[in-house]
Image (cartoon, coloured by chain):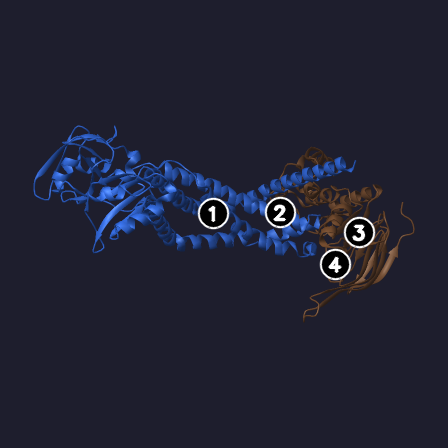
């Protein structure tokens, strides 16, 4: 369970260009659920994801993971937290160019230095599961948008995290690929993953698999919709 | 009972650390392949710098070493008479005075001098061999000459060397032997001849010598002996083997320094260029660092990865640069540097240096090339790696 208590986030604090990205956010995100943050650009969705995922720290307030405060952890522990608890799927996928698909998938595991052969096999299994095993040895530069997203998902799953964080995952995908993405997400939830996403895309926040939709505007939570039950 | 557990844990941690570094090196090699053009350019610049610096250092070290080896057989102490500050012929009667000093084993008069050959515009060193050993023994009418003399005069072993004396008399000497290239550093311009021939050529009275050489029983007492001899011969100059060696050292150090100073401008320009290229980070690299941190790499992992990149370029350039410098100096006679480092002469010594590597020279070169370059690659990365990775989400 992830809890946010009185979380504020300001950029360029004390300067003329100060931006209040998040204002007094109080939120609890349950395990094994799919939560989507929606709202216009600049509403604070992505900032909220970066705070939850330990990619940045709040200006004030606390963030707790399973009851433990994570918002004031030193960088070394935050890195371990990101590695072990969170898998990230970025809007532009952010794959490392010039190296192969398989190497990209294995990257988050390198700091833990697992044995090479099992790691390679695990990465191949993930690509198989995401239906792109034939792309394993290709450089990522030649992948289509849908393929690149699957590689990004495989990379997010390599360390077997509890939570997948995805920022505008369908922004660069057509309808068919968006549907395929939702199918993957549904499968991940069945596997016991918690999914937290941001999206402008109604195909995402109107999808039946989504448990909770949180509407944001100007750094505030303005509306929450929680579905009672999900098939 | 806890000790085996501790050692097991330590071993495991050490294996994990090594495995992690291997992963980082593997990733670094991939990253370097992606920026082939830049890395090839940096590698080439560094290779050139290390090749030049390495050549200068290896050559200077080898030539000093060569001089030291050759001087091992030189007299331990030389006594020269000075008059009005200039070197003058010394009387043989002084030998008895010096032999009486406690600690002096042997005292001998030496005959050597210079002869300017107008025909070739070259200076030769004429010398009577100190000891009549098998290799240097010369009878009256015979000579042994250096490789440079043979070359400029166009004569070989068995031929005749003609020298025109101050009195206008022509002296004819049969060439018994020509010194090999290996010893050309000190004897390229040398003409060895017998004492009677030498005295005849320079019209020198029988009891006068160029200088006197002394052999000492205990080398550690040399300063004491110089002190005693100086009291007996206050106008004389005493030159120890150590002094000669120091003179050689300073000549080659001076030349080395001169060359490095001449090259300094271009070396600095190259260094600034490569540092700029090494330390400059593109937006793509910044994004990559953000991605790596976002997916769980620690700041230290990113810095270690960049450290390996800098280290691989600089160590690679260092190894290849030193290897090329070694080949240049020892197999190609330092063709690019010899006019500055060897000095200039009409009868230029052509010799091959004995291959040798100086540990201190190599360590100095490594210290001033690998460490600054690696630091230049790490520092900007450290700045980027310590910022929050949230930018990659935007």
Q: Chain of mark 1?
A: B
Q: Colour of chain A?
A: brown
Q: Please provide percent x and percent y for residue B248.
A: 33, 46
Q: Which residue is mark 1?
A: B364
Q: In terms of sequence position, does the residue under pointer 2 or pointer 1 come before the other?
A: 2
Asked whether the residues under the numbered discs 2 and 4 touch, taking CB atoms below 8 Å apart as contact, a structural biologist would say no
Secondary structure of the residue carrying numbered label 2: helix
Q: Chain of mark 2?
A: B
Residue on which the image places disc 3: A196
Marks 2 and 1: which is nearer the front?
Answer: 1
Read off the residue under disc 2: B304
Give percent across and percent down for residue B65.
37, 40
**Decide: marks 4, 1 in contact (CB < 8 A)?**
no
Nearer the viewer's eye, disc 4 or disc 3? 4
Image-based side of B209 in relation to A214, left or right: left
Q: Check if mark 3 and mark 2 are on a common chain.
A: no
Residue B115 at what x, y percent from top left?
A: 17, 43
Quarter holding the N terminus of chain B is: top right
Using a 10 Å C-alpha cutoff, classify the residue at mark 4 as few (fewer than 14 neighbours), some (14 to 19) or many (20 or more).
Answer: many
Spatial separation of the CA atoms under disc 4 and disc 1: 45 Å
Quadrant that contains the C terminus of chain B: bottom right
CA separation in Å, label 4 and label 3:
18 Å
Left or right of B311 on screen, residue B335: left
- The Cα–Cα distance between marks 2 and 4, rounded to whole angstroms, is 24 Å
* Secondary structure under the numbered disc 1 in the rendered image: helix
**Callout in the foreground (3, 2):** 2
Tell which of A183 and A9 is nearer to you. Answer: A9
Mark 4, residue position = A57
């Amino acid at each position: 369970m992830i809890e946010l208590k009185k979380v504020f986030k300001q950029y360029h604090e004390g300067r003329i260009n100060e931006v209040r990205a998040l204002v007094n956010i109080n939120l609890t995100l349950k395990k094994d659920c799919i939560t989507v943050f929606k709202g216009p650009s600049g509403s604070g969705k992505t900032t909220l994801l970066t705070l939850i995922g330990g990619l940045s720290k709040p200006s004030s307030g606390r963030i707790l993971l399973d009851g433990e405060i994570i918002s004031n952890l030193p960088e070394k522990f935050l890195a371990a937290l990101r590695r072990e608890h969170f898998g990230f799927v970025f809007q532009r996928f952010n794959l490392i160019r010039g190296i192969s698909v398989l190497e990209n998938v294995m990257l988050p595991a390198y700091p833990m230095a697992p044995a090479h052969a099992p790691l390679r096999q695990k990465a191949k299994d993930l690509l198989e599961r995401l239906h792109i095993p034939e792309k394993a040895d290709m450089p990522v530069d030649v992948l289509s948008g849908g393929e690149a997203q699957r590689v990004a998902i495989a990379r997010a799953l390599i360390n077997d995290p509890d939570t997948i964080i995805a920022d505008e995952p369908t922004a660069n995908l057509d309808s068919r690929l968006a549907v395929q993405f939702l199918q993957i997400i549904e499968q991940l939830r069945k596997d016991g993953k918690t999914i937290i996403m941001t999206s402008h895309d109604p195909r995402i926040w109107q999808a039946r698999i989504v448990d909770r939709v949180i509407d944001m505007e100007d750094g505030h939570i303005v509306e929450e919709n929680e579905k009672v039950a999900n098939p | 009972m806890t000790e085996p557990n501790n050692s097991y844990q330590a071993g495991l941690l050490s294996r994990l650390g090594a495995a992690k570094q291997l992963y980082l090196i593997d990733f670094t090699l991939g990253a370097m392949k992606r920026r082939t053009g830049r890395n090839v350019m940096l590698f080439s610049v560094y290779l050139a710098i290390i090749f030049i610096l390495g050549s200068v250092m290896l050559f200077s070290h080898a030539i000093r070493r060569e001089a030291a080896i050759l001087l091992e057989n030189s007299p331990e102490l030389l006594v020269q008479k000075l008059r009005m500050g200039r070197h003058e012929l010394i009387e043989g009667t002084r030998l008895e005075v010096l032999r009486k000093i406690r600690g002096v084993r042997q005292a001998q008069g030496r005959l050597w001098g210079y002869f300017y050959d107008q025909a070739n515009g070259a200076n030769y060193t004429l010398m009577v061999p100190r000891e009549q050993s098998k290799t240097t023994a010369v009878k009256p009418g015979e000579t042994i000459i250096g490789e440079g003399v043979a070359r400029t005069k166009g004569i070989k072993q068995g031929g005749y060397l003609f020298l025109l004396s101050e009195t206008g008399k022509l002296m004819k000497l049969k060439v018994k032997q020509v010194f090999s290239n290996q010893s050309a550093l000190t004897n390229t311009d040398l003409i060895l001849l017998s004492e009677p021939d030498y005295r005849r050529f320079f019209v020198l009275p029988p009891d006068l010598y160029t200088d006197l050489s002394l052999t000492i029983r205990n080398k550690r007492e040399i300063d004491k002996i110089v002190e005693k001899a100086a009291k007996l011969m206050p106008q004389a100059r005493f030159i120890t083997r150590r002094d000669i060696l120091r003179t050689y050292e300073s000549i080659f150090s001076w030349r080395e320094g001169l060359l490095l100073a001449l090259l300094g401008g271009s070396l600095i320009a190259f260094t600034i260029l490569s540092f700029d290229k090494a330390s400059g980070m593109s937006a793509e690299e910044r994004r990559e660092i953000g991605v790596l941190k976002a997916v769980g790499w620690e700041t230290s992992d990113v810095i270690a990865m960049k450290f390996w990149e800098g280290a691989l370029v600089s160590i690679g350039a260092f190894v290849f640069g030193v290897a090329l410098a070694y080949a240049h100096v020892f197999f190609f006679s330092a063709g690019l540097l010899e006019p500055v480092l060897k000095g200039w002469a009409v009868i230029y010594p052509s010799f091959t240096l004995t291959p040798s590597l100086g540990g201190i020279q190599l360590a100095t070169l490594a210290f001033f090339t690998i460490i600054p370059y690696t630091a230049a690659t790490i520092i900007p990365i450290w700045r980027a790696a310590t910022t929050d990775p949230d930018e990659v989400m935007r």
